[in-house]
Image: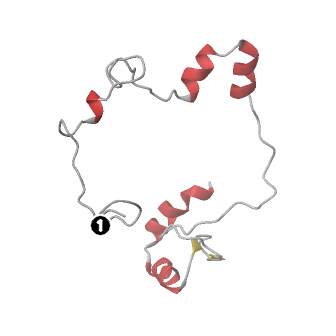
């Protein structure tokens, strides 16, 4: 057995002759540069796809209606935006916790009125 040969490694690693090659100079099977003739691929949006679609498919996509949700709508706090399990009985504002409830109690009447416009 010779030194540095075989599976054990141990020998000197030899570098490539001719220097490093970059990805842009790599040749394909046809002999052309890999990046020179390639067109940039761009994802098309839904509206672009629908423009090319037949009329039946376009009507199906644009006229699609969903059934009403089986789940109740999520309620969010009018002040913080967090999920709000509570509603203030006097102002009908939703709140998430004690801190928001105190803020509602301390708010001037005009501010409460402006915040409750979502219920109109």
Residue 84 in percent (x, y) is at: 60, 73
Could you classify mark 1 by the number of other residues whose Cα lies within 10 Å: few (under 14), some (14-19), or many (20 or more)?
few
Colouring used for the render: secondary structure
Which residue is more in the foreground, 10 or 93? 10
Could you tell me which quadrant the C terminus lies in? bottom right
* Residue nearest the observer in this picture, 25 or 92: 25
Q: Position of residue 53 (x, y in %)?
A: 66, 16
* Image height of 11 relative to 60, above or below: below
Q: Is 84 positioned to the left or the right of 18 in the image? A: right
Q: Position of residue 47 (x, y in %)?
A: 56, 24
Q: Secondary structure at mark 1?
A: loop
**Residue 30, relative to residue 71: is it above or below?**
above
- What residue is shown with label 1? 10
Question: Is 23 above or below relative to 35?
Answer: below
Residue nearest the observer in this picture, 95 or 30: 30
Horizontal arrangement in the rendering, residue 81 relative to residue 32 (left or right)? right
Image-quadrant location for residue 7: bottom left
The location of residue 31, given as percent across then percent down, is 36, 17
Compared across the picture, whether 62 is left or right of 37 comes to right
Foreground residue, 29 or 74? Answer: 29
Q: Residue at x 44, y 75 (%)?
A: 107
| Residue under the image location 50 percent in, 81 percent down | 105
Q: Residue at x 53, y 67 (%)?
A: 78
């Amino acid at each position: 057995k010779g030194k540095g040969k075989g599976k054990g490694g141990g020998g000197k690693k030899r570098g490539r002759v001719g220097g490093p090659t970059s990805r842009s100079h790599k040749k394909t099977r046809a002999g052309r540069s890999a990046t020179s003739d390639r067109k940039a691929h761009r994802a098309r949006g839904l509206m672009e796809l629908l423009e090319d679609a037949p009329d039946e498919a376009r009507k199906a996509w644009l006229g699609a209606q969903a059934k009403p949700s089986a789940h109740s709508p999520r309620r969010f706090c009018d002040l913080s935006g967090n999920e709000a399990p509570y509603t203030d009985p006097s102002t009908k504002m939703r709140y998430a916790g004690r801190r928001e409830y105190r803020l509602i109690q301390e708010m001037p009447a005009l501010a409460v009125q402006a915040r409750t416009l979502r219920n109109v």
